[in-house]
Amino acid sequence: MKRLVARLWRIIRGPMQWRILWLAHSKFMAGITGIVKDDAGRVLLLRHRMWPSDRQWGLPTGYARAGEDFGQTVVREVREETGLEVKSGRLVQLTSGYKLRIEVAYEAQFVGGELKIDSFEILEARWFSPDDLPDGIQESHRLLILGDTTS
């Protein structure tokens, strides 16, 4: 039976194989986070409207679009949420998250632009020293800022 399946698999090659694999495997959303810093080493934090009221502060985040490079997701999300331009840097963390979601975090460098927040999603945006983070910050984001990606 295994030989027959392997033989059929080789016969159907290409797009049909991908369709079968797509149907047979789990689908995941990719939550992307940017650790955006300026030249002074401050980190950009946003107070998110949709997050729990006691934990609204966090890094810029969003979901990748189909086919989008994750580093470019950081650039797009920061621009959409704040109007600022950033350059995506190194991958900091890649973990499995909740059920069908993976979590991806990249460093990013502020390169310019004027702060203009998307008031639908964001209540406030401010630069903070990593040594003076606000109360109500997501714990996972505090750990990313401090470089503790082992937790």
Image: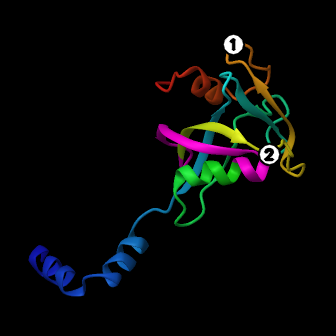
Q: Give whichever of discs 2 and 1 has the lower sequence position.
A: 2
- Badge 2 vs badge 1, beta-carbon distance below 8 Å: no
72 sits left or right of 131 in the view: left
Which colouring convention does the figure follow? rainbow
43, 84: nearer the viewer: 84
Does 84 appear in magenta?
Answer: yes
Mark number, residue 131 = 1
Residue 100 seen anywhere in this rendered image of the structure: no
Q: What stretch is highlighted in magenta?
A: 78-102
Viewport quadrant of the N terminus: bottom left
Name the spot of residue 38 as percent of width and height, x first. 68, 29
Name the spot of residue 46 as percent of width and height, x first. 78, 36
Kindly identify which residue carries mark 2: 82
The residue sitting at 13% across, 73% down in the picture is 2
Label 1 crowd (10 A; few <14 / some 14-19 / many >=20): few
Q: Callout 1: helix, strand or loop?
A: loop
Name, please, the residue furthest toward the left. Answer: 3
16 sits left or right of 134 in the view: left
24 sits left or right of 106 in the view: left
